Image: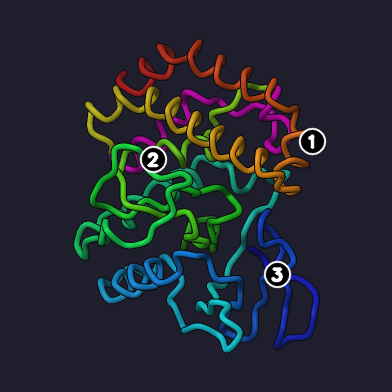
Amino acid sequence: MTARGGASDCEALAGGMVNAGAVFRRGAVVDRPAPRNAQAIHTCLSALKEQGFEGAPTPVGPAADGREQLTFIPGEVALPPFPRWVLTAAALRSVGSLLRRLHEASAAVGVDASADWSLDLADPEGGTLLCHNDVCPENVVFRDGRAAALIDFDLAAPGRPLWDVAMTARYWVPMLDPASATVSYPDGLDAPARLRILADSYGLSSQDRAELPGVIEQATESCRAFVADRVAEGDPVYVQALTARGGWERWNRMQAWLVAHRETFTTTLLD
């Protein structure tokens, strides 16, 4: 999220869907609504910090009103429609590298799989590493054109590294049919080439590369189910977003496009 407006000691941070208008920066601290699983997230973020991983906020402690407080990470965060600077090949490589560093740090400290993690976008196969699960441009802080940190770990959960790469690819390639992509992304992005860049910068093995297109399809289905659950509950944020973005027809088109291009993606990844 990016700072905007307000006094210097209390700035509203723009961005996000669920917490829009409810996140503030007070000096070096971000004050935001605490997710249900805040304790599990904070324990893991503190352990990552002790391991030397600087690419995530550090818990400061709960506020008196029960909201959570985290260290503010300075830099730029892109909001839709996304500018070209955040979609360069160099920016994409830095995202893959940052995600790899998160997973390596997580492997070193371990993750308590029995903790109260969000299951909304969690890897259905589970795992032993912390997956962010929502590495969209709005949740990556850039400095000097490179991804420096990840924010908003509300949907994080243990999973396979490949699951997190697939989730990240959905937003950064993006893994969207052209009609859907044009809503938030500039024209001319080469999806197969960008998927290869992400895989290379992360350092995916040959086996993971062969599996990645299928896992992206699986991750897309999980994201659709996540939206469907929110819409069924009558959540106005998701109901409005679904309508504005083309309804279920868009999801059908997007999923059909992934299947139709699976062989092309696989070939490009393994070439």
> Which one is closest to the eye, mark 2 or mark 1?
1
Image-based side of 52 in relation to 220, left or right? left
Contact between labelled residues 1 and 2, with CB atoms less than 8 Å apart: no
Residue 48 left/right relative to 169:
left
Q: Quadrant of residue 64?
A: bottom right
Task: Give the residue at mark 3.
Answer: 22
Residue extending furthest front? 233
Q: Residue at x 73, y 86 (%)?
A: 8
Q: Position of residue 5 (x, y in %)?
A: 80, 74
**Residue 175 appears at what percent x and percent y?**
53, 29
Q: Mark 1 — residue? A: 244
Q: Secondary structure at mark 1?
A: helix
Mark 3 and mark 2: span between their CA atoms?
A: 29 Å
Q: How would you rate the neighbour count of disc 2 (Cα within 10 Å): few for under 14, some for 14-19, many for 20 or more?
A: many
Q: Earlier in the sequence, mark 1 or mark 3?
A: 3
Q: CA distance from mark 2 to mark 1?
A: 27 Å
- Which residue range is magenta in the image? 179-203
Position in image of residue 157 (x %, y %): 37, 53
Residue under label 2: 165
Q: Which residue is more in the foreground, 66 or 154?
A: 66
Q: Amino acid at mark 1?
A: Ala
Q: How many marks?
A: 3
How much space separates mark 1 and mark 3, taking CA atoms?
22 Å
Q: Which mark is residue 96?
A: none
Q: Secondary structure at mark 3?
A: loop
